[in-house]
């Protein structure tokens, strides 16, 4: 394997391990508005197993479907996410997705049930963004395809524009960071890249708030400015801030995200995806990895995604195979 190929695999592994470690480390604190720093420190340092929740469970479903379809195919992704959920429905799913999967089992079209949720407005939850990292990894060399795949991957459960935009932005952040050189490139450049995808509107305003926060801002200020809740509009900026505040340390970024409170598992998981894509596998503490549920399976999938990314980006456009939306 060439040095570049080895580096890419390292980054993909870091990203998926970061998703799972952040999810599992944040899970015990989900929903708390005040998180005790000592309690987080004790839990982070403890030897207890790190069991992940729906964030990682769905990410694995997206990864398997990407590998199977060599891209994002809405109907096949919907079937894979439903299969994944039905095998372990106790993983802590949001309210919407199980309703989608029940309707799919009754024969509904792949994107129809999502449009019925929340009075017909569709979900603006963070669930489409929390599972999208594999899309950002595989399509990192093709920004238009990345955005189209991320949106299609969201549509299975998130019909609301903000739920879909959150997924596009999180995938684009992963895609930008996975090839950024940690030693050379300022990671804050990711915000300029995301600005091209959200030139106006509420997400643009939130990205500007992320750019305006200094690293000395208190947690109270960060939560007041960005939020820490279950919506994509809050979780994407919060994860970006947690990463950009300590971009050279995955454990510091993830632990900080947990301490922000609110939707701790998801914001820490999304932070772990960003830090892991930027810093690679070596940034994940061995002690975390030893505690982490299914770490070997995450590494195996990351390596398969890296092989797909290399073969996909080397293929002529017409041979790329997957449907884009
Ligand atoms: N109107 C009102 N509330 C909404 C709307 C809406 N249009 N959309 C979302 N919500 P959901 P997810 C609220 O159920 O995005 C797990 O714990 C509503 O309270 O579509 O997959 C994960 O770990 C709804 O239940 O699921 C993540 O933390 C909630 O947002 C999270 O759930 C989540 O939207 C992912 O949830
Ligand atoms: Mg959550």
Image (cartoon, rainbow, N blue to C red):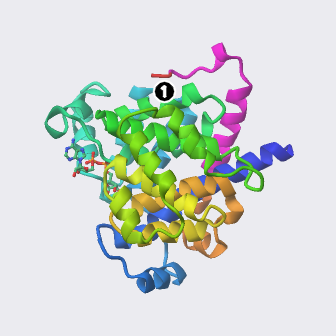
Evaluate whether residue 297 shows in this view: no
State the image coordinates of residue 77 (x, y, percent, origin top left). Answer: 43, 33
Q: Is residue 323 left or right of residue 166?
A: right
Q: Which residues are magenta?
A: 298-323
Q: Residue at x 67, y 28 (%)?
A: 312
Q: Position of residue 160 (x, y in %)?
A: 28, 35
Residue at image location 56% in from the left, 63% down from the top: 245
SS of the residue at dot 1? helix
Q: Quadrant of residue 116?
A: top left
How dense is the environment of label 1, judged by Cα within 10 Å: few (below 14), some, or many (20 and up)?
Answer: some
The x, y position of residue 208, in whole percent, is: 46, 47
What residue is at 36 percent from the left and 70 percent from the top? 220
Instruction: Please tell me in which quadrant of the rendered image residue 104 appears.
Output: top left
| Residue 97, percent from left and from top | 28, 44
User: 158 above or below 254?
Assistant: above
Q: Quadrant of residue 88?
A: bottom left
Q: Is residue 12 left or right of residue 34?
A: right
Q: How many marks?
A: 1
Residue 191 in magenta stretch? no
Q: Which residue is mark 1?
A: 148
Q: Residue at x 33, y 38 (%)?
A: 162
Q: Is mark 1 within 8 Å of ligand 1?
A: no
Residue extending farthest right: 2
Image height of 171 relative to 111, above or below: below
The residue most toward the top is 318
The residue lying furthest to the left in this view is 119
Q: Is residue 44 above or below residue 283?
A: below
- Horizontal arrangement in the rendering, residue 139 relative to residue 256 (left or right): right
> Is 136 in front, or is 100?
136
| Magenta-drawn stretch, dominant element (helix, strand or loop) | helix
């Amino acid at each position: 394997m060439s040095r570049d190929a080895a580096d890419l695999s390292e980054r993909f592994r870091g990203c998926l391990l970061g998703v799972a470690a952040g999810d599992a480390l944040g899970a015990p604190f989900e929903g708390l508005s005040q998180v005790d720093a000592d309690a987080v420190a004790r839990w982070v340092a403890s030897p207890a197993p790190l069991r992940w929740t729906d964030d990682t469970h769905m990410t694995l479903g997206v990864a398997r479907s990407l590998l199977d379809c060599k891209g994002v195919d809405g109907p096949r992704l919907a079937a894979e996410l439903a299969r994944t959920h039905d095998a372990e429905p106790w993983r802590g799913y949001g309210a919407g997705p199980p309703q989608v999967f029940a309707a799919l089992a009754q024969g509904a079209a792949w994107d129809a049930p999502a449009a019925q949720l929340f009075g017909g407005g569709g979900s603006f939850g963070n669930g489409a963004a929390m599972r999208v990292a594999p899309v950002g990894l595989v399509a990192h060399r093709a920004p238009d395809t990345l955005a189209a795949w991320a949106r299609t991957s969201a549509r299975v459960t998130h019909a609301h524009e903000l739920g879909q935009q959150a997924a596009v932005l999180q995938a684009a952040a992963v895609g930008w960071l996975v090839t950024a050189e940690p030693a050379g490139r300022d990671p804050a450049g990711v915000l300029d890249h995301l600005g091209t995808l959200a030139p106006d509107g509420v997400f643009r305003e939130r990205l500007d708030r992320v750019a305006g926060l200094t690293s000395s801002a208190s947690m109270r200020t960060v939560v007041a400015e960005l939020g820490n809740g279950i919506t994509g509009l809050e979780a994407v900026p919060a994860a970006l801030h947690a990463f950009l505040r300590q971009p050279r340390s995955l454990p510091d970024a993830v632990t900080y995200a947990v301490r922000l409170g609110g939707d701790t598992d998801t914001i820490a998981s999304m932070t772990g995806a960003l830090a892991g894509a930027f810093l690679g596998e070596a940034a994940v503490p061995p002690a975390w990895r030893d505690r982490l549920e299914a770490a070997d399976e995450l590494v195996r999938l990351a390596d398969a995604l890296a092989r797909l990314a290399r073969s996909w980006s080397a293929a002529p456009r017409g041979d790329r195979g997957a449907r884009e939306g």
